[in-house]
């Protein structure tokens, strides 16, 4: 019998939350090592990242690398209450952050205009689980799937899922609304989905 998406999500969240603080730091450093020389990054200027939450692999070291390389970084912002779409705001070292309704820090929408998602070059997408074919299991809110549904017929942005290697499973059950990743990067390797 196939495990349900919600049961799989629960067990994989427990798996990533079980990592120690040292393991988390080390994973973020190895993730940066794996991604820093990839053409998807070196050829891109506008890159969306996220602030890790709930045991997600942290792109903090990667973010610092991107800033030092002169790249522009953006953070997702939940549009309004009830909205299921994400907006993206430029993220600088001095960007003030506020907690959204899930307790995740994000830039305030009051002062800055968001960049249209189509103008991003690369989007690093957090995930709960993945398989070697590049299928991603998110947190269940559908925010990234709705926001980037247009990528089914567009070349940009390149969507790359980020995860701990321990979040890999044999097969992710897919729904018709799930948006495919170009690849998945973990603390130990890059899985190309193309």
Image (cartoon, rainbow, N blue to C red):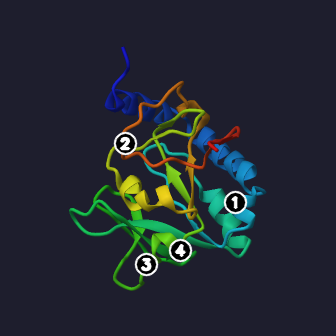
Helix or strand or loop: what does disc 1 sit on?
A: helix
Q: CA distance from mark 2 to mark 4?
A: 25 Å
Q: Where is residue 162 shown, x and y percent of the image?
A: 57, 47
Quarter occupied by the N terminus: top left
Please name the residue that numbered disc 1 is placed on: 40
Please name the residue that numbered disc 3 is placed on: 114
Please name the residue that numbered disc 4 is placed on: 119
**Mark 2 crowd level (few <14, some 14–19, many ≥20, 10 Å Cα):** few
Q: Where is residue 11 shown, x and y percent of the image?
A: 41, 27
Q: Where is residue 22 shown, x and y percent of the image?
A: 62, 41
Q: Are marks 3 and 4 in contact (CB under 8 Å)?
A: no
Q: Are marks 1 and 3 in contact (CB under 8 Å)?
A: no
Q: Residue at x 58, y 35 (%)?
A: 133
Question: Which circle marks residue 176 in the picture?
Answer: 2
Q: CA distance from mark 4 to mark 1?
A: 15 Å
Q: Residue at x 63, y 63 (%)?
A: 63
């Amino acid at each position: 019998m196939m495990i349900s998406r919600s049961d799989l999500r629960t067990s994989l969240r427990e798996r990533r939350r079980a990592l120690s603080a040292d393991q988390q730091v080390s994973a973020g450093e190895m993730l940066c090592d794996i991604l820093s020389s990839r053409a998807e990054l070196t050829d891109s200027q506008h890159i969306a990242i996220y602030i890790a939450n709930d045991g997600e692999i942290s792109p903090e070291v990667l973010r610092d690398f991107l800033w030092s390389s002169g790249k522009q970084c953006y953070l997702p912002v939940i549009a309004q209450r009830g909205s299921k779409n994400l907006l993206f705001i430029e993220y600088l070292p001095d960007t003030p952050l506020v907690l959204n309704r899930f307790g995740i820090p994000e830039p305030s929408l009051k002062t800055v205009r968001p960049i249209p998602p189509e103008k991003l070059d690369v989007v690093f997408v957090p995930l709960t689980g993945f398989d070697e074919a590049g299928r991603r299991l998110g947190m269940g809110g559908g925010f990234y799937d709705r926001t980037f549904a247009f990528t089914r017929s567009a070349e940009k942005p390149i969507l790359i899922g980020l995860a701990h290697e321990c979040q890999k499973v044999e097969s992710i059950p897919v729904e018709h609304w799930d948006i495919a990743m170009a690849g998945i990067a973990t603390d130990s390797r890059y899985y190309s989905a193309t």
